[in-house]
Image (tube, rainbow, N blue to C red):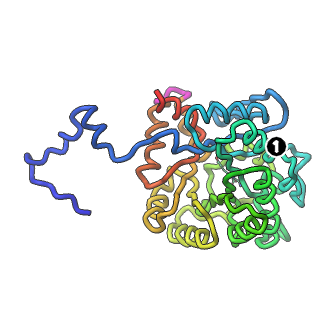
Amino acid sequence: MLPTQAPFPATRLRRLRKSAAIRALTAETSLSPADFIWPVFVREGEGVVEPVGSMPGVNRLSVDKVVEAAREAHALGIPAICLFPYTPEALKTEDCAEAWNPENLSNRATRAIKDAVPEMAVMTDVALDPYNASGHDGFERDGEIVNDETVEALVKQALSQARAGADMIGPSDMMDGRIGAMRAALEAEGFRNTLLLSYSAKYASAFYGPFRDAVGASGALKGDKSSYQMMAGNSDEAMRLIERDLSEGADMVMVKPGMPYLDICRRAKEMFGAPTFAYQVSGEYAMLAGAAERGWLDHDRVMLESLIAFKRAGCDGVLTYFAPAAARLLNG
Ligand SMILES: NCc1[nH]cc(CCC(=O)O)c1CC(=O)O
């Protein structure tokens, strides 16, 4: 598209910015609570609201409190909530069996939310890291994160989440072949309407730091995740991963982290036209919320500016810890 413009003064682009009314009429993108998926941290106990030190305003919640949060989110117009379990050390093992325990924290929280607020879409995370003694997303054998054996475990985990009632399953592990394997297993068990929202282009990022703290995985991780998560400088590789996941049966795709990777979002949306999401991750939240806490940034304004950037980049929605605060502001 090449916009046609008369020479100055016939064209004065500032006319389109002259008043709030004209600016509202000509706005290219909009932001609404319906654009948000809200990630929440779940922990054991009852009546527990435990602040996450590195994420001001974010808490770990016991299942009863997660249900309250889901009710509140639904009232605010947020369509989906995404669950991340804070797993007690004793449940982290080498075989990661807690990942597919029907009674694990994530599955209990899913059932509780679907019971209390059935309209709320529940998204879950598939990866072994919350249950793995090594902190990795896959099994480690002789220093290697092994792919195929991990995929077998991930399929068990995904099925246990579908049985608990998850609407959207989010594989965040970056193993090869997992989308196809999960799709086949879901179809075979009759879960025809369970969505796969694939973390397709997930980068090996230092912006995940506060999250690993929030789920209690920072101490555990030995080495880094570069043999399965992507290098920051790659873009063609992201397109290949997204194409691969769509061809294996992903319903929606995700780019992660968000703000430093908006070019990837734009390229993905233009190339594939699939429902495209970005994850504004814990470190992105921490740098904005932390600076705002010190009075260095205006909390509400940077929050909304950072979120509309995802829409402008072509995303259909965004996973963000700001979801309830942003929804409250947008609802006026
Ligand atoms: N499978 C792990 C997982 N799922 C979501 C996040 C990060 C989310 C965030 O930083 O907000 C991570 C961390 C990681 O890959 O180490």
Q: Is residue 294 magenta?
A: yes
Is residue 28 visible in the rendered image? The answer is yes
Q: Is residue 2 magenta?
A: no
**Circle 1 sits in a helix, a strand or a loop, which is it?**
helix
Kind of residue at disc 1: Arg
Q: Position of residue 241 (x, y in %)?
A: 59, 69
Q: Residue at x 45, y 68 (%)?
A: 271
Q: Quadrant of the N terminus?
A: bottom left
Q: Residue at x 80, y 27 (%)?
A: 47
Q: Residue at x 52, y 69 (%)?
A: 239
| Magenta region | 293-298
Q: Position of residue 87 (x, y in %)?
A: 82, 45
Instruction: Please name whichever residue, 36 or 260, is drawn nearer the observer in this view of the structure.
Output: 36
Q: Residue at x 48, y 30 (%)?
A: 331
Q: Is residue 320 above or below residue 137?
A: above
Give the number of callouts: 1
